Image (cartoon, grey):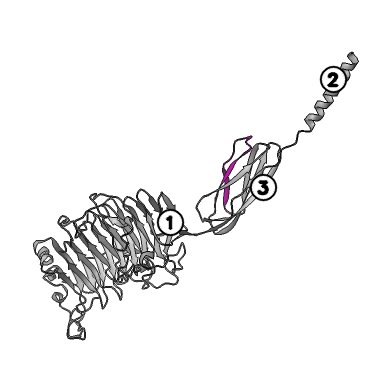
Amino acid sequence: MKKILSILSTVLLVTTFWSCGDDPIPDAPSIVAPEAFSALVGEPTDIVFTVTVPGGYKSSTVVSNVGTATVSTEPALGATSGDVVVEFSSSSNALATITLTVMDDNNKSTSSSVAVDVSNTASVTSDITANTVWTTGNIYILTKRITVTNGATLTIQPGVIVKGEAGTEANASALLIAQGAKIMAEGTVSQPIIFTSVSDEIQPGQLESPNLLPTVSGLWGGLIVLGKAKISVSTNAATAQIEGIPPSDTNGLYGGSDDADNSGVLQYVSIRHGGSNIGDGNEINGLTLGGVGSGTVIQNIEVVANQDDGIEFFGGTVSVTNALVWNAGDDAIDTDQAWAGTLDNFIVIAGTETDHCLEIDGPEGSYNNAANTHVVKNGSVKGITNAELADYRSCARGSFQNIYFFNFPDPATPDGSGGTLGRGDLSLSNPTSSTCTTDNFANGNLSFSGLQITLGQKFDNTGPISITAVFKSGTSAHATNVASGANTVGANKTLYTWTWASLDGELGDF
């Protein structure tokens, strides 16, 4: 009996041994890699690999032929499935291959790779509805009108280039900062932020276009910033639709009651080759400021070759410091709708298409900005044969101080039809059946001080142009003729060394 039990035990032991030996070793890990994709230079990108690990997850390693790649997220130890997230970035253009290797608890491993085309150009195809950063060294292409919507902030780092695609009417490309949104575009002297056209071959690190002249305009839209500060429109409504944006787009609303509204920061920004036509002769300004509040910071701005106005204010309380407009297709600086801010240290360089270097319009509705809250001061304005110094129209108000004008034509130049061209002057224009502009000048709501001009010769070379021929309606009492280079008022051009105009030698006369 004992012998039989011993034999039975031996059989059971052997059976048990062979049963354990037959357990299969789990398959090696498997990896599902994403499809090949594109990434931007300098922008960290998360790459998600989905892994299955029958033998239990142990570890992952990743290598890349360019840039840096690290495992940022992985499954728990022993897990049989999950995602491995790799953070990848490259500081240069390249075709990267990122290879992930996963090992299980049995030390079995599997590798899988994904290709990433790293370049410095990205197309922006939809509105910006969440906080977004555009990074140094890259080019962002506006494929249409792109809106930063209410509650979102677009941060543009120094040296970024933004290019707008060609288009007209509703298809005109532009960057629109809607009410309640912010733009934080803070360039530097050495790395300004440049807005231009896709036709411009400029690359990050360059400051001048390698292929477009500074006279080429209308190739894309422009930059539009809309806020909630007070405006004065003919309907007396608190808000209005900004020009250049179709009425169907409610992101084009501007105005309100918050004079301290904050739309962000624009600093060391150059806007070039814009002003595309949206229909019926209506073009987009280089920089449009609609109802922008005093909480917004705007300084060190350049607008070059815009088909419409360089900078236009539609109401609001924002102030602008150090602004240069070169080759505007209409007016260089245009103020409307009871703007109540200060423009300080500005330069205008008129081009062959420039109409008024300054066009100042009064309030359209019953709301008036307080006296002397519309201030334009410390400016230098260079004319051309077809340009006017300034036109104060439609009940214009404001204080204009320490402005130097030069290189303007004789207003008496014949037009060939028995009249005069009427260019080269500073005029006060009243609306029909009203004397409100000249009345504002008489009562001090429109005031001038410290105006200087270098007068040229009359069109027939019979002597110098008279100061009263240039400064109309009694404004000559506040103006002085000075020799070329002898002006004691005007802009400080040393603050403009970063601009295309300076690099092109356009500030030599200032």
Q: Is residue 20 left or right of residue 257?
A: right
Task: Please give the range of residues in magenta.
Answer: 67-89
Between tags 1 and 3, which lies in front? 1
Q: Which residue is mark 3?
A: 111
Residue lying furthest top? 1
Q: CA distance from mark 3 to mark 2?
A: 47 Å
Q: CA distance from mark 1 to mark 2?
A: 76 Å
Q: CA distance from mark 1 to mark 3?
A: 36 Å
Please name the amino acid that badge 1 sits on: Ser
| Pointer 1 or 2: first along the chain | 2
Q: What secondary structure is marked by label 2?
A: helix
Front residue of this view, candidates 94 and 166: 166
Q: Which residue is mark 1?
A: 126
State which quarter of the image contains the C terminus. Answer: bottom left
Within 10 Å of the Cα at label 3, are there few (<14), some (14-19), or many (20+) other Cα atoms? some
Q: What secondary structure is marked by label 1?
A: loop
Q: Which residue is mark 2?
A: 9
Q: Is residue 86 magenta?
A: yes
Residue 313, quarter of picture: bottom left
Q: Which mark is residue 98?
A: none
Total numbered labels placed on residues in the image: 3
Between tags 3 and 2, which lies in front? 2
Q: What is the x, y in percent for residue 146?
A: 39, 58
Q: Is residue 487 visible?
A: no
Q: What secondary structure is marked by label 3?
A: strand
Q: Is residue 11 magenta?
A: no
Residue 447, quarter of picture: bottom left
Please name the amino acid that badge 2 sits on: Ser
Q: What is the x, y in percent for residue 216?
A: 37, 73
| Pointer 1 or 3: first along the chain | 3
